[in-house]
Amino acid sequence: MGPLFLPMIRSVSKFISFTILLLFGLACTSFTATEAYDPLDPSGNITIKWDIISWTPDGYVAVVTIYNFQKYRHIQAPGWSLGWTWAKKEVIWNMVGGQATEQGDCSKFKTTIPHCCKKNPTVVDLLPGTPYNQQITNCCKGGVLASWVQDPANAVGSFQLSVGQAGTTNKTVRAPKNLTLNAPGPGYTCGRANIVKPTKFVTADKRRVTQAMMTWNVTCTYSQFLAQTTPTCCVSLSSFYNDTVVPCPACSCGCQSNATHPGSCVEPDSPYLASVVSASSKNSYMPLVRCTNHMCPIRVHWHVKLNYKEYWRVKVTVTNFNYRMNYSDWNLVVQHPNFDNLTQSFSFNYKSITPYATINDTAMLWGLKFYNDLLMQAGPLGNVQSELLFQKDQATFTFDKGWAFPRRIYFNGDNCVMPPPDAYPWLPNSGFRQYTSLLTLIMTSLSTAALMYVHA
């Protein structure tokens, strides 16, 4: 009987192995798909529209528009760069509102030289102050795009390009492939270009509507795991009712003894500090931080400051430990159940965002224009702060068990490392004080009775 069952056993073994490999592949696929999901901004993305507005003898003229539909994640200097691969042998004859970073090999052109002949061009925005004859609407911001909540008018960028050696009809033209978006570093993953309903444009006098010949749509999503291998911020906590200051968890963003990045931190009193900072490459995205226990470029401190009869007060301080970066148009996203009763934010702008429908427990905070919207590099001026005044809801308010501290904090769209809940400042044990007071009262009463009995 043994030889008869041997082929069956081998078949079952192969089937089990195949099933395990299939499940592993599906798991990997699911993890890849969910890496970019943000529970506080589930529909946030960057959408790129490629509108063909006219045909030319050997190609077309297109307007490419980048929309930042993310609530609180913006693109800061040195700005975005957009790359792709041509489907055929296209070239860029000229551009307005943007420029290709490299021209490539255009030696086969004898008379008119194209702007770019590369198979995989990379385009960047032009700088502010560009001559008007080289501008189009929403261009020339140095690649900086605001977040949709902070400043929707400046959350859009665009450029125009004339493409040659391409198709000249909707049936012969081909969409670019393998789009990549750096903002300014990695972190974004772009899907394929899809044909969508042509974009309609309204003239300045709003009396005429024109339409693109063809429109491609590309969606790019952000993943903090792809952007950097370590966190970029951490949270520390303190309160008026407890002397304990809970620091950022040790090695939140790295450790000083990390041999893989030697020289990644510097002491503030080091005599070589000025030379190290000045020698830093301006285009380097690797932070140079002050040597700390947590090694994070950004620390957010939440201090429960005062308690009133119907209100309570919090002080929020954001400190920059990065010597290489000034954070312009920074923002915080804080999750706490009492944000449904925020009375006043003294030095920060405030906007409620409701990722969970009617539950109003998430707030976006950012600096006031020309006052504290710029978080300076590490040093005496490298911090911004404000106070928040909350009205108490007597049904839910308590200082017990760390309720007064935030559930989650984001800085510039990146999730910050929180201390463990068992380390939060707790209320002093009032039960022990009551017990001591009662015992003292009993002993005093007994002593008094004894004295009265002796002297009676």
Image (spheres, grey):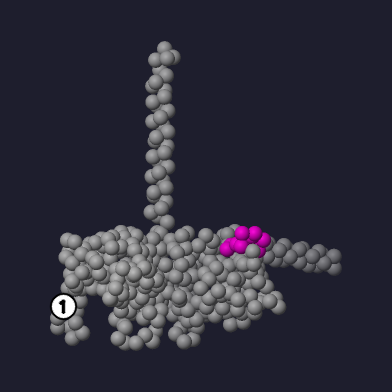
Task: Residue 14: name its quadrant.
Answer: top left
Q: Measuring 24% from the left and 66% from the top, which residue is drawn there?
A: 165
Label 1: how many residues lie within 10 Å, few (<14), some (14-19) or many (20+)?
few
Q: In this image, 419 relative to 222: left or right?
A: right
SS for dot 1: strand
Q: Which of 267 and 313 is in front in this view?
A: 267
Task: Residue 70: name its quadrant.
Answer: bottom left
Q: Measuring 28% from the left and 65% from the top, which residue is drawn there?
A: 90
Does 157 sit above or below residue 32?
Answer: below
Q: Does the magenta stretch include residue 427?
A: no
Q: Which of 264 and 129 is in front in this view?
A: 129
Q: Position of residue 234 (x, y in %)?
A: 56, 66
Q: Position of residue 46 (x, y in %)?
A: 35, 67
Task: Residue 383: name its quadrant.
Answer: bottom right
Q: Measuring 39% from the left and 40% from the top, which residue is drawn there?
A: 22
Q: Is residue 331 visible?
A: yes
Q: In this image, 51 relative to 41: left or right?
A: left
Span shown in magenta: 252-261
Q: Where is residue 456 in the image (x, y as percent from the top left)?
A: 83, 67
Q: Where is residue 393 in the image (x, y as percent from the top left)?
A: 46, 70
Q: Nearer the viewer, residue 153 or 48?
A: 48
Q: Measuring 38% from the left and 54% from the top, which residue is drawn there?
A: 33
Main secondary structure found in the magenta portion: loop
Q: Which amino acid does label 1 sit on?
A: Val
Q: Can residue 299 be seen in this view?
A: no
Circle 1 sits on which residue?
Answer: 209
Does 191 sit above or below residue 387?
Answer: above
Which residue reaches farthest right?
455
Assign the N terminus to one quadrant of the image. top left
